[in-house]
Image (spheres, helix red, strand yellow):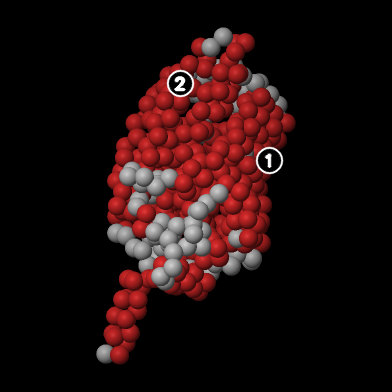
Amino acid sequence: MQSEVKKLNKSFENENLYNDCPSWRLALFALNNTATNLYMWGMMYLANYATGIAGLMVTVVGFILTAMRIFDGITDPVVGFLIDKTDGKFGKFRPYMVIGNIILGIMTFVIYKTVHLVPENFRLIYFVLCYAVYIIGYTCQTACTKAGQACMTNNPAKRPKFGLFDAIYNAILFTGMQMYVASYLVPKHGGFGNISLYHELITLVIIGSAILTVLAVYGIWPKDRTEFFGLGNKSVEVKFRDYWPVLKGNRALQMLVVAACTDKIALSVAQNATVGIMFFGIVMGDYSLSGTIGMIVLIPNIIITMIGTKYAQKLGQKKALVVGTWVSMISYVVLVAVLVLGDPTQIRLNDMGLMTIVFLVVYIIAKGATGVSGAFVIPMISDCADYETYLSGRFVPGMMGTLFSFIDKLISSFATTIVAFSVAAIGFTDKMPDITDAYTPQLFWVTMFLFAGMPIIGWICSLIAMKFYPLDKEKMEEVQTHIQEIKNSEPELV
């Protein structure tokens, strides 16, 4: 009986301590990230379009996409500042979600439909200007993913669920889109040299992202109100010059940035469309495997992510990220060993030999662990935002999310350049590798470095950073208790 009373008291305390929300609303809001990831997927083939259709040089396109990624990072603090200043009848986040998605749709259509038609003398400038406007829209919507969840819930047992929903959606999205491109679009249009492939691709991207954005807006609607913004009506004035003190004084944000950014640049390289073409289409010799293998590992990956989420709910997001990172690193080392010691061309689903079985088992573990290690980064940004409120009284989720994004994009912007210069070093200077290109030992080792070597380096950096990340489960409970005490106090903060 006493244990039941303690449980009831604990439940009552948590109910008053935490701003909570139904899981289904959290699930809907997580679709905002899926909506922008759908555009990210569509833009993964931009280098192929720009070089193969629009006729721009490989290294020039690689440099431009890197520069535009840096510009993307520069726009983040500005948009984050505007979000933190916004608090109207349409809320803080919903206007930026909607406006951002509209810009994305228009500019994606314009880029893929018109760049190759522009006179050659003006084509490069036109491409850069269109892509710059696209980036502004992308920043508006993605900033809301990182910042908006802070007002959805601050319950440590509920926040990891955002990571779970996000990981499941992304697993389905990336697997489904890879299957769609590799098994449907490429055979239908005869490869990436046909403009009709890109037109069909962006039609799906624009319509699908718009639907997902509407669902995400509905999910956050009742929580996008002043009373759920940090200290509620006890607001603290935010100035643009506050960015540096926040970054300088918030150790949690600093370490999360290091961990996530090193992972991001590494995984952005590994997941680059060109690397996928090289890995599956040339090294294995069957590009359609990228889609079918993705479908095979989808359900196991979701199950592994669910296990990781349960672990995070009990022991904290920091510990779950560390465990997932260790398993990711070890499994990728094993994966490289399998590919080096075995024959990748023997990996075939219509003739399941030992090589195929070993590869699939290791690949499932590797991709599942990668999903776990990445699932908690966005929820941990909200923890960092609450930690800033705990330290200084400022509720600046827009600033926190976009500070994170700024540094993240600044560093990860070099992913496209790394891929472009890597393939150029082995002879691909006029165009990116295609499924029709011949296998060479040089191509194999460059593929191994891009596909597995870069992620392993990133995970090593993450583990070092997490040693100094202060927000474990116990610390977050202390943070939320302190914030609630401030909310319940009489004097208003100014």
Q: Is residue 482 left or right of residue 416?
A: left
Res 83 visible: yes
Which residue shows up at 63% across the image and 42% down it?
410
Label pair 1/2, CB-CB below 8 angstroms: no
Q: Nearer the viewer, residue 69 or 96?
A: 96
**For numbered disc 1, what is the local secondary structure?**
helix
Res 271 visible: no
- Above or below, 113 against 29 in this view is above
**For numbered disc 2, what is the local secondary structure?**
helix
The N terminus sits in image quarter: bottom left
Q: Position of residue 341 (x, y in %)?
A: 64, 49
- Which residue position is annotated with label 2? 110
Which residue shows up at 33% across the image and 43% down it?
90
Q: Is residue 217 left or right of residue 465?
A: left
Mark 2: give few (<14), some (14-19) or many (20+) Cα within 10 Å: some
Q: What's the amino acid at mark 2?
A: Val
Q: What's the amino acid at mark 1?
A: Trp
Q: Is residue 370 left or right of residue 105?
A: right
Q: Residue furthest left?
A: 1
Q: First in sequence: mark 1 or mark 2?
A: 2
Q: Nearer the viewer, residue 492 or 255?
A: 492
Q: Position of residue 474 (x, y in %)?
A: 50, 74
- Which residue position is annotated with label 1? 445
Q: Nearer the viewer, residue 461 or 174?
A: 461
Q: CA distance from mark 1 to mark 2?
A: 37 Å
